């Protein structure tokens, strides 16, 4: 895939992740600094953990700050807009949330593929588990850090098939590139498309993994 296009998709994902971080911050009634921190952590947290695992020190978020600066700028902008136009946005929240979800799904797909690419470039092409794990960590790690910092159960552990979409697409990409099934560009397209399709279908049809609901109901009554 063209590097310029891939970079543009990564920026789109960074923007979406930053917005999701700010939304959580607003829900938790944090100030603008807290919103920026959550937006930044959501956007680059997964990539930083990836780099530490692969031995890239300092992480690329510090060596190539374009993603961090983008996340900070978007976080400030979204917080300011919400501060002045929050009520208007709330009236059309369903429409905005759908748009954000699409960008978020793009970020999930692109960062999954990017994480696996980093593992391959670091010499772990033959390590299936490590490559896929690093890809999923890159895509989902920032969101987990965001939720933990906001004192809530990480969304990927209880809602939709977010992480599973990343795992599925990551497995496809690793197999296609690691075993030379198809070209790298074609593997990127197929993997990204699979993740996007799964995420969109999960959102439309509200797919969730099975949960033992009656235990939760008992907890509420206690």
Image: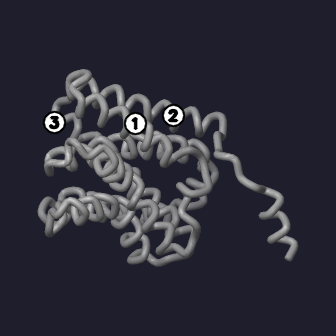
Depth check, front residue: 39 or 73: 39
Mark carried by residue 3: 3
Q: Earlier in the sequence, mark 1 or mark 2?
A: 1
Q: Residues within 10 Å of mark 1 (few under 14, many from 20)?
A: many
Residue under the point 26% across and 64% down: 48
Quick one: which residue is furthest to the right in this view? Answer: 221
Mark carried by residue 169: 1
Q: Earlier in the sequence, mark 3 or mark 1?
A: 3
User: Where on the picture, by quarter, is residue 112?
Assistant: top left
Q: How far from the left and from the top, in percent, is residue 147? A: 50, 67
Q: Is residue 48 above or below residue 172?
A: below
Q: How far from the left and from the top, in percent, is residue 63? A: 12, 63
Q: Residues within 10 Å of mark 2 (few under 14, many from 20)?
A: many
Please state which of the two labelled residues, at mark 3 or mark 1, is closer to the viewer. 1
Q: How far from the left and from the top, in percent, is residue 200? A: 53, 35
Mark carried by residue 32: none
For the residues labelled 3 and 1, say whether their Cβ atoms are less than 8 Å apart.
no
Q: Is residue 34 above or below residue 113?
A: below
Which quadrant would the N terminus be assigned to in this image? top left
For the residues labelled 1 and 2, say whether their Cβ atoms are less than 8 Å apart.
yes
Residue under the point 36% across and 55% down: 137
Residue under the point 20% across and 48% down: 124
Name the side, left or right, on which 161 lies relative to 115: right
* Mark pair 3, 2: CA separation: 25 Å
Please state which of the two labelled residues, at mark 3 or mark 2, is closer to the viewer. 2
Q: Is residue 9 above or below residue 45?
A: above
Please state which of the two labelled residues, at mark 1 or mark 2, is closer to the viewer. 1
Q: Secondary structure at mark 3?
A: helix
Residue under numbered circle 2:
198
Q: How far from the left and from the top, in percent, is residue 202? A: 59, 38
Residue 10 visible somewhere in the drawing: no
Quick one: which residue is furthest to the front in this view? Answer: 126
């Amino acid at each position: 895939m063209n590097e310029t296009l891939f970079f543009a998709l990564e920026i789109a994902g960074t923007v979406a992740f930053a917005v999701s971080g700010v939304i959580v911050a607003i829900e938790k009634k944090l100030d603008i600094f807290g919103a920026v921190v959550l937006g930044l952590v959501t956007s680059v947290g997964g990539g930083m953990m990836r780099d530490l695992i692969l031995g890239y020190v300092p992480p690329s978020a510090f060596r190539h700050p374009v993603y961090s600066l983008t996340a900070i700028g978007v976080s400030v902008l979204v917080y300011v807009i919400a501060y002045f136009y929050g009520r208007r946005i709330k009236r059309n929240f369903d429409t905005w949330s759908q748009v954000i979800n699409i960008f978020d799904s793009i970020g999930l797909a692109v960062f999954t593929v990017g994480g696996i690419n980093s593992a391959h470039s670091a010499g772990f092409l033959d390590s299936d588990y490590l490559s896929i794990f690093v890809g999923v960590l890159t895509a989902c790690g920032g969101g987990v850090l965001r939720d933990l910092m906001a004192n809530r159960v990480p969304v990927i552990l209880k809602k939709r098939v977010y992480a599973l979409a990343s795992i599925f697409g990551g497995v496809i990409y690793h197999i296609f590139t690691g075993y030379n099934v198809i070209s790298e560009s074609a593997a990127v397209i197929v993997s990204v498309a699979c993740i996007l399709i799964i995420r969109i279908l999960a959102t439309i049809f509200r797919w969730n993994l099975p949960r033992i609901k009656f235990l939760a109901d008992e907890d509420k009554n206690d």
